[in-house]
């Protein structure tokens, strides 16, 4: 749970010092007022990444040369956490001292939902690979090392192939070890996530067709031992040299999301796509909670594209969690749902709300 947040020169937010309690928090404001920026600040503080910008430099307030975010989290004990970006680069601190990335990621687990996450359902496979990797690292921050090892090996192999592919055999061995480890982690995560998704949907009042998650690793033998993975990678050697590109490995994995026996991306409506994405988000959060890493929920424009019945069903996914932040520009929509705290954001300034009407 987040118990304190301070922000300086982040996006359009005015300098902020905030002490949110547990429970549900509704952040109300017009478009452009800073609602999403506040959720983004929480996400960046927890993960060192933005959910809407590829570069953290894009989060710096116009006219400034850096930003600073900090706060206090209570998960397993209390910890202070801080991230800053300026002329000297990115700075991470935990309890006043420099922190590695995995140390930082271990402090404040978060699960977010934004419009960009619709790409899980309708977008390219890379979006679903990111979904898997967020889940793997969220559960075990040290798994960031597995991702880094694979990416380094893949970058080296790409460089060799671009230069004609000499000595590719040696790098195939390195790549196979990293690939087999990453595939095993992704497979275990998807199996656990699918079980939680089944539980979320079983408890829901929504009448939905059968929904399933299926992991399709590259190679299909991946995760079953380095020798089998290496054999599959080596079998593609000539084709890779010819095309000067690595054709086998977890960078080509797919997560199939099926809706009533069909690929969800081909058959679901806009509203169904959002409900499905929210159900997967809830399953991610439940999986973290089951591992004693109960996350903070960050839900941007949850009510958009949902009628009252579907909004009630979607909110039921998240209401039981210890701390939930949700944004909206329609306070009256939320009156039936027992939101515990409301906040008004105007021109980047945060103030306590008095009414949802």
Image (tube, grey):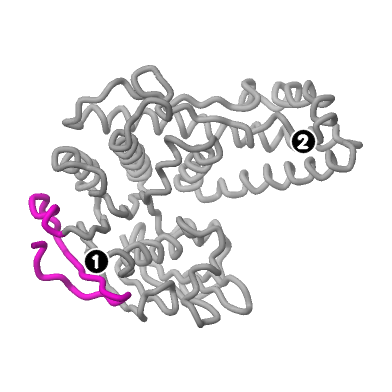
Q: Is residue 108 magenta?
A: no
Element under label 1? loop
Q: Which of the image's four quarters has the C terminus?
A: bottom left
Q: Would you say residue 142 is visible in this rendering?
A: yes
* Quadrant of residue 182 within the rendered picture: top right
Q: Is residue 125 above or below residue 94?
A: above
Asked if residue 150 lies left or right of residue 139, the reply is right
Query: What is the x, y in percent for residue 104?
Result: 50, 61
Residue picked out by circle 1: 29
Identify the residue at horizontal 54%, vertical 35% (top origin).
Answer: 125
* Quadrant of residue 211 within the rendered picture: top left
Mark 2 burial class by Cα count in 10 Å: few <14, some 14-19, many 20+: some
Query: What is the x, y in percent for residue 290?
Result: 34, 41
| Badge nearest the viewer, 1 or 2 | 1
Magenta residue span = 331-357
Q: Is residue 337 above or below residue 235?
A: below
Q: Which mark is residue 245?
A: 2
Q: Would you say residue 212 is visible in this rendering?
A: no
Q: Is residue 349 magenta?
A: yes
Identify the residue at horizontal 51%, vertical 50% (top origin).
Answer: 141
Q: Is residue 293 above or below residue 231?
A: below
Near-viewer residue (291 or 70): 70
Near-viewer residue (236 or 153): 236
Query: What is the x, y in percent for residue 179?
Result: 66, 34
Mark 1 burial class by Cα count in 10 Å: few <14, some 14-19, many 20+: many
């Amino acid at each position: 749970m987040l118990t304190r947040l301070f922000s300086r020169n982040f996006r359009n937010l005015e300098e902020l010092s905030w002490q949110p309690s547990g429970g549900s928090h509704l952040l109300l404001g017009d478009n452009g007022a800073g609602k999403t920026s506040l959720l983004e600040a929480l996400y960046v503080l927890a993960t060192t990444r933005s959910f809407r910008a590829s570069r953290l430099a894009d989060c710096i307030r116009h006219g400034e040369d850096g930003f600073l975010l900090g706060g206090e989290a209570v998960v397993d004990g209390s910890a202070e956490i801080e991230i800053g970006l300026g002329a000297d680069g990115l700075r991470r601190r935990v309890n006043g001292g420099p922190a590695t990335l995995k140390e930082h990621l271990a402090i404040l687990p978060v699960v977010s939902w934004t419009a960009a996450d619709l790409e899980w359902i309708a977008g390219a496979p890379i979006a679903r690979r990111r979904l898997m990797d967020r889940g793997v690292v969220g559960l075990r921050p040290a798994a960031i090392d597995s991702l880094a090892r694979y990416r380094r090996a893949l970058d080296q192999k790409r460089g060799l192939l671009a230069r004609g592919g000499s000595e590719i055999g040696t790098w195939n061995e390195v790549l196979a070890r990293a690939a087999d480890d990453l595939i095993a982690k992704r497979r275990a995560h998807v199996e656990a996530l699918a079980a939680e998704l089944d539980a979320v949907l079983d408890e829901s009042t929504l009448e939905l067709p059968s929904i399933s998650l299926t992991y399709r690793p590259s190679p299909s033998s991946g995760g079953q031992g380095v020798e089998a993975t290496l054999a599959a990678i080596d079998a593609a050697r000539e084709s890779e040299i010819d095309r000067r590109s690595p054709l086998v490995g977890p960078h080509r994995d797919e997560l199939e999301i099926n809706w009533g026996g069909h690929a969800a991306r081909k058959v679901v409506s806009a509203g169904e796509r959002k409900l499905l994405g929210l159900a997967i988000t809830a399953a991610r959060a439940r999986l973290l909670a089951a591992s004693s890493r109960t996350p903070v929920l960050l839900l941007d424009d949850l009510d958009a594209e949902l009628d009252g019945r579907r909004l009630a069903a979607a909110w039921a996914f998240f209401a039981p969690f210890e701390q939930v932040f949700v944004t909206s520009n329609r306070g009256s929509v939320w009156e039936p749902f027992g939101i515990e705290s409301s906040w008004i954001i105007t021109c980047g300034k945060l103030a306590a709300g008095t009414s949802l009407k």
